[in-house]
Image (cartoon, helix red, strand yellow):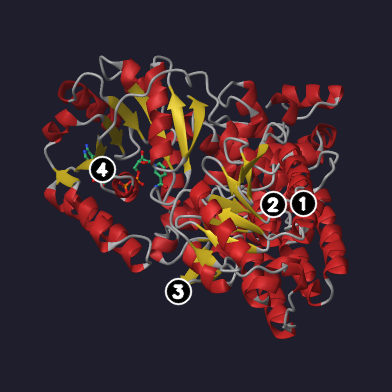
Amino acid sequence: MRVNEVISIEREGPLALIVIDNPPVNAAGHAVREGLWKAIEAVEADAGVEAVALYGKGRAFIAGADIREFGKPRREPILTDVARRLEDCPKPVIAVLHGSCFGGGLEVAIACHARVAIPGVKVGFPEVTLGVIPGAGGTQRGPRLTGIGAALSLITTGERIGHEDALSCGLVDRIEEGAPREVALRMAEAARTGALPCRKTGALEVTPDPETIAEVTARLEATQGHLFAPHRAVEAVAACTGPLPPGLALEREKFAACIESPQRAGLIHAFFAERAVEKIPEAGASPREVAVVGVIGGGTMGSGIATACLNAGLTVRMNERDEAALERGRETVTGNLEGAVERGKMSAEKRDAALGRFKPSVALEDFADCDLVIEAVFEDMGVKREVFGRLDAICKPGAVLASNTSYLDVNEIAAATARPGDVIGLHFFSPAHIMRLLEVVVAEKTAPEVVATGFALAKRLRKVAVRAGVCDGFIGNRILSHYKKVADYLMLDGASPAEVDAAIEAFGFAMGPFAVSDLAGLDIGWANRKRLAPTRPAEERYVAVADRICEAGHYGRKTGRGFYIYEGRDRRPDPEVAAILAQERETAGVTPRSFSAEEIQARFVTAMIAEATRVLEDGIALRPIDIDAVFLFGYGFPRHRGGPMHTADVIGAAELVARIERYTEEDPYYWQVPDLLRKMAAEGKTFAEMN
Ligand code: NAI
């Protein structure tokens, strides 16, 4: 019997199965909630039904709430009421969990009278990762099943666990093999005969545990003090020791506060950004088959890229200039795989299989069978053009020829071959086997199926691909080059590197700009500044502090000194840098002034947004949300702020224009209002409207 378009009831004698069929993942949107409510009413009213089981069709039980409904007017019945309705059913109702069962899905499950897991299921409360807390009884029924400690750990981290952990912590009662429908029938019968014990979760007692609550609160304060939702989750869980109804009411209150919080909007935007970037003009083109990848260069990037490809099951060839360099590349890749085994991320068998597919060689001729080649040699146009010329002569027709260049012109690289349609930029981020961003740089002549191949490769490597056009630095590094200058100006004008970094870290970045430069290696920026020196406009303020540090032989972390002195994991300001800075200020005739953290953050973010707007104007990024994805997945932009363009909307175009106009008085060359921003301010428009 069909209840509505997504819920139906199947009868087998005294058993009723409630079937959820809302592809692709049975999200608990309005139709599911309403259907479940009506289904429970129906089975309750049917005197012939003695036991009920819920199961999902397709990939999941219920993967979670329908997050597209967040922030919109709520539609009855809400999930809290559906869960209560299920729990209050006088007949045993059991949930059969398979595939994924997260958030709202898990809340439906724990409101049932027993839970059976099919091996392979993943369960969890990922709400905090979206800026909310479980809002349909998760914080009240969860601890009644698992105890306060385990529930807090699941709810405050969003961790996903498998069937065995779910059984041992008490979230599920049994593990059963089989197809969902078959298990549902078997278990409904077991519930009917009493072989599967059933009880109302809400009626269970929970032991108070103030110590654990205090411990988790202190830990959150220390590590995620700036995040809103995890703290609200702890407050809600702390209320679970009393009767259920007031606990549910308090949870609802905290949930509503989370829904209203700007962090929720930022985190949901970040969630959608990951999916939005897949929409590209070339989406209809068929990607080329890729089984064998060639990597040229076994340095920092080449070995990381090779590791990422091996992890994804690809065969990887690696080329270097000589045997010694090749050996270093081989060692780094092997070390990366070993590290994964040591951290329990990879089995020894998988490592052996990966090493079996790894084929380093100094003979570039061995790349003749590669389906895709990624060049990661020195950042030098001459070297890159020579490599591409050779690849053109060696590689089979149809091979994709990619460059990992950070800044250089991919059109010029492509012109070194007779097949520019096959040439593309695949810009990985360091460490390439860990960072999720991949900029897919589309040159003038790049063929659509080559673009599609770049996106398919990213998917295979579990990376987030963002389409970028050709310019100096593409999306991310172009914007980075711009806002790094504002950090330099703040420093020259009076803030210390440590003050700038502290302000940016307080904004939510894991590391401030000077700490990042030290980590990446100051020599990289130095080389780039030398490359660009001949084209630097006379009006541009130039801050030579980093050059002076490099001249002293300090390249950052790798040499133990840069903007800071490094001892183990600690950093402390370098007095030599303070002396260089004092000298540079004197040379520039600057009287240092002080900047508050808010002022530093405002200038930094405004510079980032201004250049990002120009990147959009130039058509380098398809949409504002693509820029957000680049910064969220490649540059450590705080996820709860949703990315620079989302942040721009929070600040508002008019305020941004006003700020830039204020700064223009100090430096009319650097601070210019982008036309698009001015137009947006005049028309009251947002970047979100352009996505
Ligand atoms: P690296 O200096 O660590 O490695 C470059 C490697 O290329 C060296 O091992 C060198 O021996 C090898 N090599 C040079 N010429 C060669 C040739 N003709 N044939 C074969 N091998 C050759 O440099 P890194 O950092 O790995 O950078 C490589 C490329 O990746 C550059 O274009 C860089 O701009 C880009 N990139 C670097 C990032 C980083 O964070 N280091 C991030 C993203 C891109």
Q: Callout 1 environment at 10 Å: few (<14), some (14 to 19), or many (20+)?
A: some
Q: Callout 3 environment at 10 Å: few (<14), some (14 to 19), or many (20+)?
A: few
- Look at label 3 and name its amino acid: Gly
Mark 3: secondary structure: loop
Location of mark 4 (residue)? 297
Q: CA distance from mark 2 to mark 4?
A: 68 Å
In the drawing, does residue 479 fall left or right of residue 263? left
Q: Is residue 346 above or below residue 689?
A: below
Dot 3 or dot 1, earlier in sequence:
1
Location of mark 1 (residue)? 44
Determine whether the beta carbon of the residue marked 3 sits less than 8 angstroms from the nearest atom of ligand 1: no
Is mark 3 in CB contact (under 8 Å) with mark 4? no
The image quarter containing residue 670 is top right
Dot 3 or dot 4, earlier in sequence:
4
Mark 4: secondary structure: loop
For image coordinates 63% across by 58% down, the residue present is 94
Choose mark 1 or mark 2, whichever is in front. 2
Choose mark 3 or mark 2, whichever is in front. 2
Q: CA distance from mark 3 to mark 2?
A: 67 Å
Q: CA distance from mark 4 to mark 1?
A: 68 Å
Is mark 1 in CB contact (under 8 Å) with mark 2? yes
- Look at label 4 and name its amino acid: Gly
- Look at label 2 and name its amino acid: Val
Location of mark 3 (residue)? 568
Is mark 3 in CB contact (under 8 Å) with mark 2? no
Residue 259 position within the rendered picture, expressed as x and y whole percent measured from the top left = 80, 50
